[in-house]
Image (tube, rainbow, N blue to C red):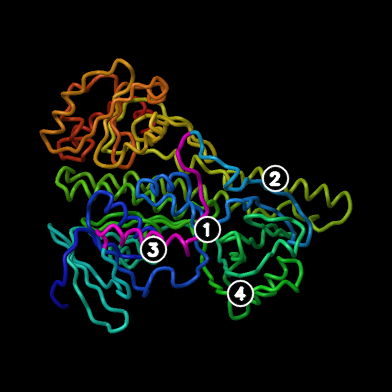
Amino acid sequence: MSGVHSEVPVLIIGGGPVGFCLALELAFHGQRSMVVEQDAGTGLELLAKAGTLNERTMEFCRRWGIVNEVANAGFPEDYPRDTFYCTSLNGHLIGSSPMPATKDRKPPPSGPEMLRKCGQHIFDPLVARAAAATGKCEIRYSMRFESYSQDADGVNVELSNVSTGKRFTIRAQYLVGCDGSTSAVRQQMGVALPGRQLDYSVSAMIRVQNIEHYHPLGKGERYMFIDKAGTWANMTTVNGVDLWRFTLLGSEDKLDLARLDMRKEINRALGRDDIPYEVMRVVPWRRAQTHAVRYRDGRVLLAGDACHTTSPTGGHGLNTGIGDVASVGWMLDAVMSGWGGRHLLDAYEIERRPVAIRNLGNSTENYEVWLDHTGYERVFDEGPDGNSSRRAIGARLAAALKQEWHSLGIGMAYNYYCSPIVYPDGSKAPPDEPSTYIQTSRPGHRAPHAWLPDGHSTLDLFGHGFTLLILGSNPPDTAAFEQAALRIGFPLTAHALPQPDIAALYVRKMVLVRPDGMVAWRGDSLPADVDELLDIVRGSPAGANRQRGHMQDTPALRKTA
């Protein structure tokens, strides 16, 4: 191994969307990073990847200053997002799940941003450019991660040039593996990735012009193809123009590429063989629900697919990974800046792993609807009986898959109430349902959105350090709180919000919000020991010991222990 070639605060392995979003989050906090990617560039291949950015991800894009670029990335605003269930594009229509086009939608009442379509072939280069433009992210392509060794002060990471094999060593304070489901970083950590293998699929990227001219169903975002055994394939628009992702479901032996006639399968879905199209890339993959048993080894951490994989039924994979970024980013900044305690990073896995397990489980529930093989025997029958059967199938699918097409609760309603750096108050959590989201200022939850008189969202107040919201027309004196924060170098900004509707939404007169926009504490009066509260929420050793006592004394937690 050669000597150390450079030093960097955070070294990120993996130049995909999670890696570059982590670089953006670190830059937002003023921290430098280096992204290492073994490919020669970003978005060099047109892969069948994620394309849906949920409302919470768009809120993070808002804080990084790229929300307009993502929103205007090219997906047509007038393109309908309907899902059609059919035997083929030119066969029997079974049913549909209507969804309005972008131009006909608005952000939900609970947030300033709405879900967007942005294919990864566009999103990945976009966030790579944005990360580079911060001036705080160095990108090194054609470099492969080989190994790491760590000590009390940092991590030595050995890399190799993909073309020449020449080896380099980078010294970092922290290493984050964002290198996907086969993560070499996770493998060296010795971390298992248990879970379920759901099936084997093959996806093809196809290009076809004006496909709506070749079938009677009309424009849709996706088409699900049904036969007597249930769902056997689906086709989803990538760019709302001419790119489509066609996915064939099956088993390992059925989807052997050496024997698979992909054009035959595509023509079967199209319902005719005279539609001109180009098959651009065919990729076999395993659909799985897996989650790492650990997210951290000292100064080495995992994020995104490196620590959890999911069926794409719901679009939760990438969005869950970007949630990881928002959590680990501010924690890394805090410990490197000196105000975060040595137990702060312990909370990362404690907070994010349950969220991943929850989201993965929901995705699998959606996919199991696809796998239901009952009740399809008469799907091809002609006449009234066949029509009746198809209507029943369509209604059943639309109802069962509602949470896949409408998943605001999955994106927004996760919570960190049991985190060691959240101060519990014994309150009851609102329902955690896939399709609905109820705003709450309860500790561990996303701080509620409300529009301010100047047109900004309350969410725009959060991010740089902690934020103390002082609410209502008769606010308490928070001088002791602010002075305690100043004494220990705890970054705190106070905002008075006298508006009655915002005060009612936040319930308490004071709400302490973390840099990631999650509530850390709330109350109508200052706690008896402000220093204790600050120690808890910043992960100091003293706070960790005190928090254990608070958690044991909280009735809501005793009931679920």
Density class for disc 2 (Cα within 10 Å; few <14, some 14-19, many ≥20) is: few
Asked whether the beta carbons under mark 4 and mark 2 sit within 8 Å of each other, the answer is no
Q: Residue at x 49, y 54 (%)?
A: 72
Q: Nearer the viewer, mark 2 or mark 1?
A: 1
Check the image and name the residue furthest to the right: 383
User: Quadrant of the rendered structure where residue 161 is?
Assistant: bottom left
What residue sits right under mark 1 in the picture? 74
Real-space CA distance between mark 2 and mark 1, rounded to the nearest whole angstrom:
34 Å
Which label sits on residue 424? Answer: none
What residue sits right under mark 4 in the picture? 279
Q: Pick the residue in front: 308 or 515.
A: 515
Q: Determine whether, in the image, residue 108 is placed left or right of residue 550.
A: right
The reply to whether the magenta stretch includes residue 270 is no
What residue sits right under mark 2 in the picture? 396
Query: In this picture, which residue range is highlighted in magenta?
Result: 110-137
What residue sits right under mark 3 in the picture? 16
Amino acid under disc 1: Gly
